Amino acid sequence: MSNQHTYVLGLNTYDHDVSACLLRDGAIAFAIAKERITREKHASGFYREVIEYCLDAEGITLDDVDLVVRNCYILPVAEMEDRLVYQDMPGFLPEYERADVARHPLYRSHSPKVVTISHHLAHAYSAFAVSPFEEGVVMVVDGVGSYRSDVSEPYPAADTATPLARESESYYRFSGSGIECLKKVWMEPDRGFLSDEFYNMPGLGALYSRASSYIFGDWNKCGELMGLAPYGRREQIKPLLDIADNELRVPRWSAEFNQPYVMDSGGKWETSRSMRHWEDLAWRVQDDTEKVLLARARWLRETTGAKNLCIAGGVALNCVANGRIAREAGFENVWIQPAAGDDGIAIGCAAYGQLEVLKQPRSFVMKQSYVGKPYAEQDIDKALRKFLVRIQTTAVRSDDICRDTAKLLAEQRVIGWFQGGSEFGPRALGNRSLLADPRKAEMKDILNSRVKHRQPFRPFAPIVLAERAQEIFEGEEDSPFMLIAKRVRAEWQHRIPAVVHVDGTARVQTVSHDTNPALYRLLKQFEALTGVPVLINTSFNVKGEPIVETPRDAVICFLTTGIDNLVLHDTLIAKNALHTIVAPLVRVYTDVATLVMAGARAP
């Protein structure tokens, strides 16, 4: 196989969301985030597992790879790996991985086949290089990127900063395979406790993470912050960002913000007396973020005259802001990388290698994100044959799985839906999804209480037939990656209340037959039964865990939660009477629970 194809491997390394992407002749063959394999959310550390996943799926070895391109936003990878030799940094390389590192051919490699690029450049390539546009502009906004001293692309001389300033925003123009940096916005280092100076840096993404840490005790709960924002009161807190003449100003926080969530305080987050303050702060940060991003996008449009905009970087996961940019910034077309966060860096690294190093023309458009490896029927059979699985379940092969599943959904059943390769990125887009009927408002509470165990304020997203989307949701823009929030039309809000957020919006995913035929057929069958071409779609996992990857992961989640039925390809699985006996034992006795987990995961 290797003699017939050119392979480029892209890697995001060491810090959160370690990932790999394998290109075959310029097209994504496979991509995976480490968390899906290790089951550790936002997994950091070494990258052996993600490399092996992609190579095994393709049936090649590392020797068959023509080029490896990598990034670590903390330091250039070579310097990072030198430091790991003499520093104990368990957050980036835990002790149990050190033996693997020492033996791996890519660790501290000096091969000319191994290239390192800087952070925002990788984000930019992840967006424009796989977009459907021949030319346009790119917006990259995230929490923190590379040091100025480590940036590997030219940028305007006027955008000055000290060597230890970090990337915060970057703006580019592209045509074909070429890209030019138009503007960089830097964050200068700030004083802080140990390593928390990031939260005090004057940047848009840094501020959002600072507010997330303040409200939830975790910098990486920005999605929850976006969901909480509509509950806040307008203008109760002074602006925390200000932009004038395209210059951003981020005032320092002061002691008036004196109600941070402290995880070890003993009180529950949901019943905190600070809730009103947190809601108001969430509104303010979200409103400021939308205004700044919209101002930047309009500047980019007016400066370049471009018709097409591509977006990447962690802030691009803010679907409310994306909706405003799509509707109000003046671009004809907006395309957002589905893995806009740091897992998508692997795509950008690989694309850089293909276009800039190997000098190959662009030839691939990322129309869908189902780039995980497929699992065979024997993998499903193996997961279901485990003793403690088999005695609790009844499995039936369906001759029309979409028809049978639609009937169960119309009966208010919660379905675990497992099809094809997994989605790359943080959103479940219909191959590793939990699906439910949106017609009753209480379904949101059922999903939260039985399966997801999330805060009750967080909304669930709708999937909708692409050709019916404008009838139900405002706005003409397509949203195949669930990255744009739209207002639900008034005449539909009472028909699909389980997916309508408190502000009347929904984070929409449009589904077409070309990109996901099974999900499309399921929606058509559900529409035939109910007259509603919409389903609830949420990620197939429980709070604090990554989305399931394998049939074994799906079976474990099914048996240990209140999911009613599990669909694995064409197999429909239900819990039988013995489940009510075995399940309490699993919950009570640790040794039995361990046995179930080991039995389900064993090869």
Image (cartoon, rainbow, N blue to C red):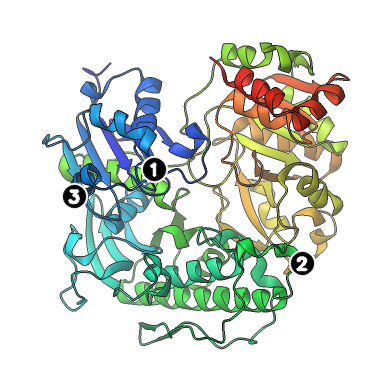
Q: Are marks 1 and 2 in contact (CB under 8 Å)?
A: no
For label 3, the residue is 79
Amino acid found under the numbered disc labelled 3: Glu
Q: Is residue 300 left or right of residue 282?
A: left
- Disc 3 from disc 2: Cα separation: 46 Å
Asked which secondary structure carries label 3, the reply is helix
Q: Residues within 10 Å of mark 1 (few under 14, many from 20)?
A: many
Question: Is residue 28 visible to the viewer in this orientation of the structure?
Answer: no
Amino acid found under the numbered disc labelled 2: Thr
Amino acid found under the numbered disc labelled 1: Val
For label 1, the residue is 18
Between label 1 and label 2, give the one nearer the viewer: 2
Q: Where residue 361 sits: x, y (%)?
A: 23, 41
Q: Are marks 1 and 3 in contact (CB under 8 Å)?
A: no
Q: Quadrant of the N terminus?
A: top left
Which numbered disc flags the more N-terminal residue, 1 or 2? 1
Asked which secondary structure carries label 2, the reply is helix
Nearer to us in this view, 565 or 4: 565
Asked which secondary structure carries label 1, the reply is loop
For label 2, the residue is 271
Q: Which mark is residue 461?
A: none
- Disc 1 from disc 2: Cα separation: 35 Å
Which numbered disc flags the more N-terminal residue, 1 or 3? 1
Residue 29 figure quarter: top left
Q: Is residue 265 above or below residue 431?
A: below
Which numbered disc flags the more N-terminal residue, 3 or 2? 3
Q: Is residue 244 above or below residue 322?
A: below
Q: Residues within 10 Å of mark 3 (few under 14, many from 20)?
A: few
Q: Is residue 185 above or below residue 106?
A: below
Nearer to us in this view, 351 or 165: 165
Question: Is residue 139 visible to the viewer in this orientation of the structure?
Answer: yes
Q: Is residue 78 above or below residue 194?
A: above
